[in-house]
Image (spheres, rainbow, N blue to C red):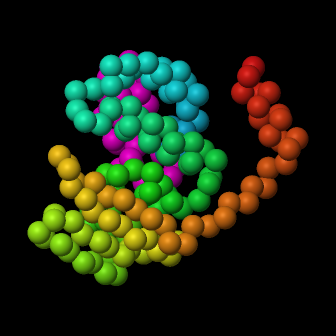
Amino acid sequence: MDILGSFLSGDPKKVWLASNAIRELRDEDELRKISEHLKKIRKETKHVFKDGGPGLLSNSYHLNFALEKLRFIKEAAGCQCELYPNNMFFNPNKEADKGFVVITDKLEDAQNWTADYKCECTSCGNKFHVHQGEYHYTWYDWTNLNPRVRHTSETLLQKVFKYVKGRL
């Protein structure tokens, strides 16, 4: 089953897997195709994690990030690295192994199971400070050191048409 089919299945495990697949997916064309179904995905997954899940972190965390990433892609909002601060599971070491960032500095504190990284996006040059923490699982707090200011070219009239079209 493809990612879109998993989102629309109503099966919590498949939705969770699809959400994580979206987090990992970098193919802009594939993401754009899936993002065209964002409204339907939102509708079909609205109550899929009503009980939250068995862990410390609600399963909806992964779904909410996937929906945010699809919205970001649909709106052509910028480089995908800008999403790093919105998800604690982007491991800078894995992102570097995939070629998405370069780690320019790393300071480890083995006694406290923490580390601090300085990273740079290989696509747009954004620089990040990343703090690695530990509590039941390893998490990463990304801070964009040079976030860009978004300027939309969409006029008020275009926004109104988009809103009305979405309500039909």
Residue 148 in the figure: left or right of residue 136: right
Residue 74 seen by the camera: yes
Q: Quadrant of residue 159?
A: top right
Q: Residue at x 75, y 55 (%)?
A: 152
Magenta span includes 103: no
Residue 8 image point, x, y percent:
43, 22
Residue 164 image point, x, y percent:
80, 27
Q: Residue at x 60, y 44 (%)?
A: 74
Residue 46 image point, x, y percent:
48, 22
Q: Quadrant of residue 45?
A: top left
All told, the count of numbered labels is 0
Q: Image quadrant for the C terminus?
A: top right
Instruction: In the displayed orientation, state which residue is furthest to the bottom.
Output: 104
Q: Is residue 6 above or below residue 137?
A: above
Instruction: In the displayed orientation, state which residue is furthest to the front.
Output: 112
Front-most of residues 27 and 10: 10
Magenta stretch, overall SS? helix
Q: Is residue 123 above or below residue 6?
A: below
Magenta span includes 12: yes
Q: Is residue 110 above or below residue 80?
A: below
Magenta segment, which residues? 1-30
Residue 104 image point, x, y percent:
34, 81
Q: Image quadrant for the N terminus?
A: top left
Q: Residue at x 52, y 49 (%)?
A: 29
Q: Residue at x 39, y 50 (%)?
A: 87
Q: Quadrant of residue 78?
A: bottom right
Instruction: In the displayed orientation, state which residue is furthest to the right.
Output: 157
Residue 80 in the figure: left or right of residue 94: right
Residue 1 seen by the camera: no
Front-most of residues 146 and 44: 146
